[in-house]
Amino acid sequence: MHFTDPVYRNPYWPTWPLIQITQSCTHNRCEFCTMYKGIPFRMQPMEWIEQDLKEIAATDPHAKTIQLLSANPLVMSYDNLMPRLELIRKYLPDLEYMYTATRVSDLKDKTVEQLRNLRDIGLKEISLGVESGDDWTLERIHKGYHANDIIEQCRKLTEAGIDFWMSFLNGVAGKEHSHDHAVNSAKIFSQCKPMLVGTGGLTLFPGTPLLEEAQRGEFAPLSEKEMLIELKTFVENLTCDCRFITHHTVSGKNLTGPNFLKRKDSIVAALEHEIEHGDMDAMAAIRRNKRSL
Ligand code: SF4
């Protein structure tokens, strides 16, 4: 198989099969991310994809799902992407779901009709690491698009019938803009109506511009308690029904699951309890030991 390290896959999807369609990330500028630093972007050659598909088909000829890697395969033009997806279907005819992560900006050059064609060939789920719906924050972290772009591209996905996930990066606006980041993200996410909302907490990894800015006093990271307060504000303001995933395990209670609106009050109550009684030192220690996003 032709994989380039690091191989990042969605942990909520089957671990196999995976296939690399592109290498690295075309953007590589987000202030909190070192995932693909120093790794050039490249479209995977068709011959490599075909060799990998032969390997997958030899061991798993009736595969029902496949995850496309790496950071943003949909940056490819429709004309480059479609033949690759057709090749996947040729080798895995029983496939029902293709999944990929991608950037909001990758969807701009695709029409609804093209997105519908991609869906019809099997691309039924996309994950958008939007991180925030707040324009100040999106600019601050160099995400490369604005809230209006998120709304417009998600509208196209909805029209095309492609399900999508959206992620909220808790803490990424720092102390200065925490409240607006939470409220405005919840507003934009609610408007877009994703099938799933995921939240992760900011960790300042070595090599990230945001860590260097924090060391120079130009970025004020949230404490663990402030992270929880921001997450609670986001949850309180989120009004779309969806599956909700958070990596916070609060007082032994797993907050992840479907039917967000039915569970919203209990999630808020659990967060409130943790804000008052949680072991912030233990949470900080867990964060310090994290090695990747
Ligand atoms: S967060 Fe995603 S889009 Fe941003 S640099 Fe990292 S991989 Fe690329």
Image (cartoon, grey):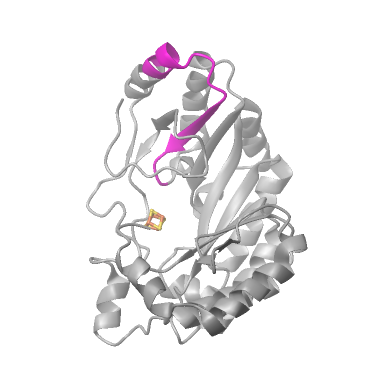
> Which residue is painted at 29% across and 51% down in the image?
36
> Which residue is painted at 66% across and 41% down in the image?
162
120 is within the stretch colored magenta:
no
Quadrant where ligand 1 appears: bottom left
Front one among 152 and 89: 89
35 sits to left or right of 277: left
> Which residue is painted at 47% across and 44% down in the image?
10
Front one among 136 and 98: 98
214 sits to left or right of 178: left
The mark total stands at: 0
Q: Is residue 59 visible in this depiction of the protein?
A: yes
Write the start and end of the magenta stretch as one range: 54-71
Front one among 290 and 126: 290
> Which residue is painted at 35% across and 83% down in the image?
219
Where the C terminus falls, by quadrant?
Answer: bottom left
Where the N terminus falls, by quadrant?
Answer: top left
Question: Residue 202 in the image: x percent, y percent?
Answer: 41, 69
Residue 8 vertical position relative to residue 183 in the rendered view, above or below: above
Question: Residue 185 in the image: x percent, y percent?
Answer: 60, 70
63 is within the stretch colored magenta:
yes
Question: Residue 171 in the image: x percent, y percent?
Answer: 46, 74
Front one among 139 and 101: 101
Q: Is residue 109 visible in this depiction of the protein?
A: no
218 sits to left or right of 68: left
Question: Residue 73 in the image: x percent, y percent?
Answer: 44, 40
Outermost right residue: 262
Residue 277 vertical position relative to residue 41 in the rendered view, above or below: below
266 sits to left or right of 246: right
Residue 38 vertical position relative to residue 135 in the rendered view, above or below: above
Where is residue 76, by image quadrant? Answer: top left
